[in-house]
Image: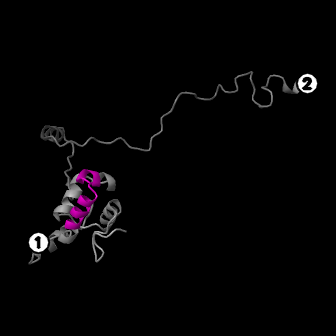
Amino acid sequence: MSGRGRGRARGTGYSLTGGGHAHQDWTPQTVSNFAPRVQATHAESSINKTRQQGGQVQVTTRQGAGGNSHNKFDHLHERKIANAEDEYVHKTVDIQVSTNIRRARAKKDMTQQQLAMAINEKVSVVQAYERGDAIPNGQLIARMERALGLHLKGPRALEPF
């Protein structure tokens, strides 16, 4: 064995003898980018206590705090509806379509629950469509047509595909 590799781990170049690492600090360190936060409190007693101790109290109010801020322009829509002279009524399913759904379901000997399961919807949705209360959804009507195997609207209503 040559003297060149003596005292070293083979192939690493690190010395196994001596205090090569004695100058290094191996204690764990915690690094954080966040400054310590002052806890905000809304209790009257803690605010008074801070004032008595000479501390500063800053009161801020949030715009729309606690509300649903998903759509920031809802108030404009609400104002437009409130100022409208006639009432805003949603379009509902045509009475002919609702009766066709009932008739087609009866033709196929299906219950509302079975139709709901076939189109992957709740029973209440099928009931609303049959009553004519539902807001029409073309995709949902198309799924009903496929499940029942009949057209539900138009000149070919109640005819098979």
**Residue in view at x 15 percent, y 40 percent:** 43
**Residue in view at x 67 percent, y 27 percent:** 21
The one nearer the camera, 45 or 121, is 121
Residue 16, above or below 110: above
Q: Quadrant of the N terminus?
A: top right
The one nearer the camera, 68 or 36, is 68
Q: Of the residues shown, which amino acid type is indicated by label 1?
A: Ala
Q: Which residues are magenta?
A: 98-115
Distance from label 2 to label 1 (Cα)? 96 Å
Give x and y (percent) for residue 114: 28, 51
Give x and y (percent) for residue 94: 20, 71
Residue 127, above or below 156: above
Label 2, on which residue?
A: 2
Give x and y (percent) for residue 60: 20, 53
Give x and y (percent) for residue 101: 24, 64
Q: Of the residues shown, which amino acid type is indicated by label 2?
A: Ser
The one nearer the camera, 12 or 90, is 90
User: Taking 133 as reference, is 5 left or right?
Assistant: right
Judge whether residue 112 is colored magenta: yes
Q: Does the image show residue 72?
A: yes
Find residue 41 and report its image quarter: top left
- Disc 1 crowd rating (10 Å Cα; few below 14, some 14-19, many 20+) is few
User: Taking 79 as reference, is 20 left or right?
Assistant: right
Residue 61, above or below 40: below
* Residue ranking furthest to the left: 85
The majority secondary structure of the magenta stretch comes to helix
- Disc 2 crowd rating (10 Å Cα; few below 14, some 14-19, many 20+) is few
Label 1, on which residue?
A: 82
Q: Earlier in the sequence, mark 2 or mark 1?
A: 2
Find residue 17 and report its image quarter: top right
